[in-house]
Amino acid sequence: MNNNGNKRAPTTATQRLKQDYLRIKKDPVPYICAEPLPSNILECDIGAGCVPDYHWNFHLSGDIISGFISGGYYHGKLIFPREFPFKPPSIYMITPNGRFKCNTRLCLSITDFHPDTWNPAWSVSTILTGLLSFMVEKGPTLGSIETSDYTKRQLSAQSLAFNLKDKVFCELFPDVVDEMKQKQKAQEELSVRTQPLPLPDVVPDGDPQHAHYGLPAINGGPVPLGAANPAPGLQQANRNHGLLGGALANLFVIVGFAAFAYTVKYVLRSIAQE
């Protein structure tokens, strides 16, 4: 009896995916990286209980169009049927991205939602390049969501920490993980350097609890005990001093005006006598 009878001969899908994988490694696509799961690699042994599909993981990264994916890393997965390349794959996004729902089968012209538009000549690189173009568009489709640019930028920054917690991502993309850790460290250092200085606490005028009379208590510094709670007698003396100063000023103005008037009258009288 043939011992190889329990093993399935390489299928068209297996051969094709092998070619696509070698092509990606030889000629990488910008902003895109893809790896098959080690537990479900290209050749499946049916006798060993392999699942009937081929699972690949991918990530999109880099600075792409208007900063939508600027600095972000977006993890997803491709599930190829055994009829590949004659039938299209399913596509799922795993990292929150603001464009597509997570862990939801996406309805795109390159997925199994539209077998009528599928082209068997399309490779894994073609599929992921097409997904990248859909990522930066805003057209609605099944599985898409609408978010603001601000939300997308937030998710872009948060994608580093999110993916670093994903065991599968870290196992499949170790080089990217090192890059992400360095980038995350740089972000943390920048955040520390750009923290705003504390603003002074402005004390309201006449606040008896602070008694700074409108002057700021810089950095919340302690107010001297004597200044914070002046004696009632000192407050009254200061108030009387202010009233007296105002009265004297008014008196000087009146006297000066009278002297000026008298001088003018004297000059006019002297001219008339001449």
Image (spheres, rainbow, N blue to C red):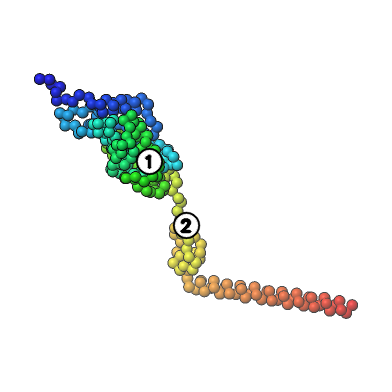
Give yes or no for contact between labels 2 and 1 (Cβ–Cβ under 8 Å): no
**Residue 240 visible in the snapshot:** yes
Instruction: Give the structural element (helix, strand or loop) at label 1.
Output: helix
Q: Which residue is mark 2?
A: 200
Relative horizontal placement of residue 68, taking residue 89 as reference (left or right): right
Query: Which amino acid, mark 2?
Result: Pro
Give the position of the N terminus as an image quadrant.
top left
Residue nearest the viewer, comparing 219 with 29? 29
Instruction: Give the structural element (helix, strand or loop) at label 2.
Output: loop
Of marks 2 and 1, the one in the foreground: 1
**Residue 72 visible in the snapshot:** no
Query: Which amino acid, mark 1?
Result: Met
Which residue is situated farthest in the front direction here? Answer: 116
Crowd rating for badge 1 (residues with CA inside 10 Å; few <14, some 14–19, many 20+): some
**Residue 258 in which image quadrant:** bottom right
Residue 266, position as x, y percentages in the image: 81, 77
First along the sequence among labels 2 and 1? 1
Q: Residue at x 69, y 76 (%)?
A: 254
Residue 261, position as x, y percentages in the image: 76, 77
Q: Which residue is mark 1?
A: 135
Residue nearest the viewer, comparing 174 with 151? 151
